[in-house]
Image: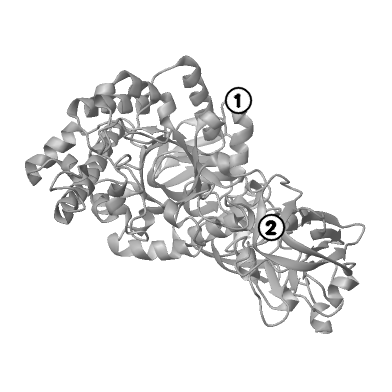
Amino acid sequence: MRLLISLIALCCPAISAATFSFHVLGNSPGCWPAILSSLGVSASPLDQAQIVIAPAGSPAVPVKESTIVILEGDSPLANSLGFHPTENRVSVRSIEDLRAPKLGIVWEQSLDLPVFEVPKQARIFAREKWQKAPLTAGFRRGEGAVLWIAAPPGELGYERFPYLPQALADLGFDPPFRSRNLWAFFDSSYRARADLDYLAPKWRAAGIAALQIAAWHYWESDPASDDYLRRLIEACHRNAILVYAWFELPHVSEKFWEQHPEWREKTALLQDAQLDWRKLMNLTNPQAFQTVAEGMRGLLNRFDWDGANLAELYFESLEGHENPARFTPMDDDVRDEFRKTAGFDARDLFDDSSPRFWKKNAAGLKQFIDYRADLAQRQQTAWMEQVEQVRKNKPNFDLVLTHVDDRFDSTMREKIGADASRVLPLLGQHDFTFLIEDPATIWNLGPRRYLQIAERYKPLTQRQNKLAIDINVVERYQDVYPVKRQTGTELFELVHQAAVAFPRVALYFENSIVPADLPLLAASAATVDHVEPVGEKLSISARALVGVHWIGPALVDGKLWPVASNDTIWLPAGVHSIQPAPTHAGIRLLDFNGELISASAHDDSIEFAYRSSAQALAVLQRAPQRVEIDGAEAHPPINGAVLLLPRGQHLVTIQ
């Protein structure tokens, strides 16, 4: 053991300052592979590891000062590094993280732990809430660091200390990989006074590729609101972030609800369908449909959107027919249409004096449930056709359909009319991304659920590249520990597993991601299957575009590589090798919002191939003198240093 420990961190420091590998001493790695792999760090033999985890009882052995050592509880090794248990003990259930002292952190099961003395130079990151006994602490040590925790993190990795990754980052941990492929939902009512030019670079650094912007706030033209939205779109485009108009039909806008009481949707109690924040309109009514369609097209043409997101186009409620106060649709148009096919009024299903009351009439209830699912699919088709009309004038326009999962939670079809098996065949007629929203009923389940959800959608479509997953970062109604809203380790594991399972991950919503999570978010979304340092080279196998932490010029697969910023090389999916180069490419592509296929550098030009479902945004080191697209000279729009390229698959040459 002593010999092995003394070899730690001899692996090639010239490659990068990033941390690529870890090793857990002993025979049981516990939860550490889940924690560290979610940040791009792979398990390795001890002599190659840059992070070493020492469980309780680990012997006192020499440790290289270039290593990050993580200590669990009491051990001779922890004692040798200055962490000593005292005779006092503390029962720990609630803890206080000094990064977020107001965050309620409660363990599901309390632990009786000794109170530790920590080295004077150590920074305390978390402590027991009432007696203030230290629970996590650490200090820098040479080029490495020491992080001590009073107890193991738990079976899943996030049951006790949400901000272990942030503590590691404070001590010098630098994730090796990053993604810029995330989407995030954005509601301007939470950001009315924000500095958009400050936020946009932060979003991009956090890996956000597109914002889904709440469009209902801009349904009616208003000078101040319109100016805000234009500035938001411009700030996003300057930072290679796409912008989508996010619709929540049948909610249109507050003003539209007030102006058109005659088109308000009805619940099964025949009350106006004002449910939570959404005020639902009857879009089955032909006149209402035409008025809303004209408003949608006008809004999409009024601003420089990159696409539209038709979200949650089905019905209320999550309690289904058992809660008639929330059950929709029950407007006159729906009832008339259903009566013509079924021979009875759907309202009778909710009249306990009627022989057709649902408790006495299972067949009739099934008829309406089936009709409702069919109506949802018809409305989704109709609104996608409205977006297709906009595409005639905006050929780079993208389309997203956000649809709650009904494969993992199969009750969604009966409760809200959601049926993915009816919608996914529409990919044969329309080009869109099918964004799966995991329903509130399973928010308490762990990160592995995304792999299960993905498996259930594979039989429904061959176009797996058009599937995406939406993670709701919200206060959960279930009993969850240690925090109500996903943050820290849990969030990173959720994002990473979702990115492994799906080609695109969205987060609901931008404002619910706490500042402490933003610096590590891009790392959690990266999907690298294998990394191996060999001498001065780094071999990487990635399943999607990935950024690799790298300082200085580089050769990729033996050739000068032009897609790189000052600290990151961007690689296409596949297997690649990176090694130092004597000089940078003459022209560099610093950032790119699209799927990079290949790239090469020449004496006075660069060439790259890409594909994108929307326009692609390319951030150049300097303004181009000449641009060719697919072999022909082109003059694409340029916004500062950002080149706006067409959707689809193309080959671009820049001089």
Q: CA distance from mark 2 to mark 1?
A: 31 Å
How many labels, in total?
2
Q: Is residue 447 above or below residue 251?
A: below
Residue 55 left/right relative to 554: right
Q: Is residue 187 above or below residue 551?
A: above
Residue 196 left/right relative to 161: left
Q: Is residue 651 above or below residue 164?
A: above
Q: Residue at x 51, y 42 (%)?
A: 509
Instruction: Name, please, the residue furthest toward the top.
Output: 223
How dense is the environment of label 1, judged by Cα within 10 Å: few (below 14), some, or many (20 and up)?
Answer: few
Query: SS at mark 2?
Result: helix
Residue 119 left/right relative to 48: right
Instruction: Name, please, the residue furthest toward the front.
Output: 353
Q: Residue at x 64, y 54 (%)?
A: 488
What's the residue type where badge 1 is placed?
Arg
Quadrant of residue 640 within the rendered picture = top right
Determine which residue is flagged by label 1: 193
Quadrant of residue 523 within the rendered picture = bottom right
Determine which residue is flagged by label 2: 165
Identify the mark nearer the N-term, 2 or 1.
2
How dense is the environment of label 2, judged by Cα within 10 Å: few (below 14), some, or many (20 and up)?
Answer: many
